[in-house]
Image: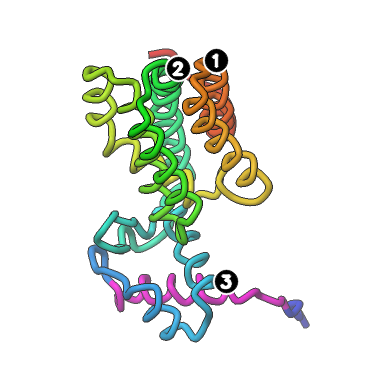
Amino acid sequence: MTVRPVRHRSLVEEATAELRRLIGTGEWPVGSKLPGEVELSRLLGVGRTTSREAVRVLIADGQLRARQGSGTYVAAVSPVSRFDRELRRSETFHVYEVRAALEVEAGRLAAQRRTEEDVLALRAALAARDAAADPIELVEADLELHRRVVRAAHNPVLTRLFDSLLDALREAGGYVVAADHPHAGTDQDAITGAHHALVEAIAAGDPTAAAEATGANLIRTLDQLRPTQTTPH
């Protein structure tokens, strides 16, 4: 006789399994929109934190996709393959490589050229980032803060270049947060500290400190995303 050991599953695991069941059975077909966070928590019979974590798991697995200002939608019936996840990770790594190169210089220039109005806007954007209550809100607030840094550099070409990358940056940022790379656990405090240090360096007119703070933020993310082996193109 084979007896399977009884396993204790957390509420997050139970909620994740139920979401997978609803998607797999076609209750929520590909392209459909999930209920809002409050309604989803009610349907699952769990707290908002639990339902939010379950959604994050499925976003990381590629079954769900969050669209800023619209909601969360079913993207695939089953989790994407490991190969596809690694491919997306590699693409995100390359987006962040470009972002790091662009934003380190933007931070340096912003510290040299910022106005009082720029500093006020930066502090407001930083406060909004600190107050972000969910992954989608965090990604958007983070992008707005970095957009303000770029604008404070007062280089119109740099601003246009950053704005042209916004869609790619938003998708990459969503992946980073959903996949729980550097934006959770103990690293969260370090990343939040780096953003505060960046704003203070710009306000103080210290270009070296601004560049270092930008690097401390983005290079940490790059290290988390770095493929085990990259192929030159």
Q: Of the residues under marks 1 and 3, which one precedes in the sequence?
A: 3
**Which residue lies at the image location 40% right of the left edge and 44% below the top edge?**
125
Camera-nearest label, 2 or 3:
2
Q: Quadrant of the C terminus?
A: top left
Label drawn at residue 216: none
The three-letter amino acid code for the residue at tag 3 is Val
Quarter of the image holding residue 7?
bottom right
Is residue 15 magenta-colored? yes
Label drawn at residue 208: 1
Q: Position of residue 181 (x, y in %)?
A: 56, 44
Q: Is residue 53 visible?
A: yes
Q: Report how far apart the C-alphas of labels 1 and 3 lie in the structure.
A: 43 Å
**Span highlighted in magenta in the image:** 7-28
Asked if marks 1 and 3 touch (Cβ < 8 Å), the reply is no
**Which residue lies at the image location 65% right of the left edge and 51% below the top edge?**
185
**Which residue lies at the image location 34% right of the left edge and 63% below the top edge?**
77
Asked if marks 1 and 2 touch (Cβ < 8 Å), the reply is yes
The three-letter amino acid code for the residue at tag 2 is Arg
Label drawn at residue 108: 2
Query: Residue 168, relative to residue 134: is it above or below?
Result: above
Q: Nearer the viewer, residue 143 or 7?
A: 143
Q: Report how far apart the C-alphas of labels 2 and 3 lie in the structure.
A: 42 Å
Q: Main secondary structure of the magenta part?
A: helix
Q: Residues within 10 Å of mark 2 (few under 14, many from 20)?
A: many
Q: Which residue is mark 3?
A: 12
Compared across the picture, whether 54 is left or right of 7 comes to left
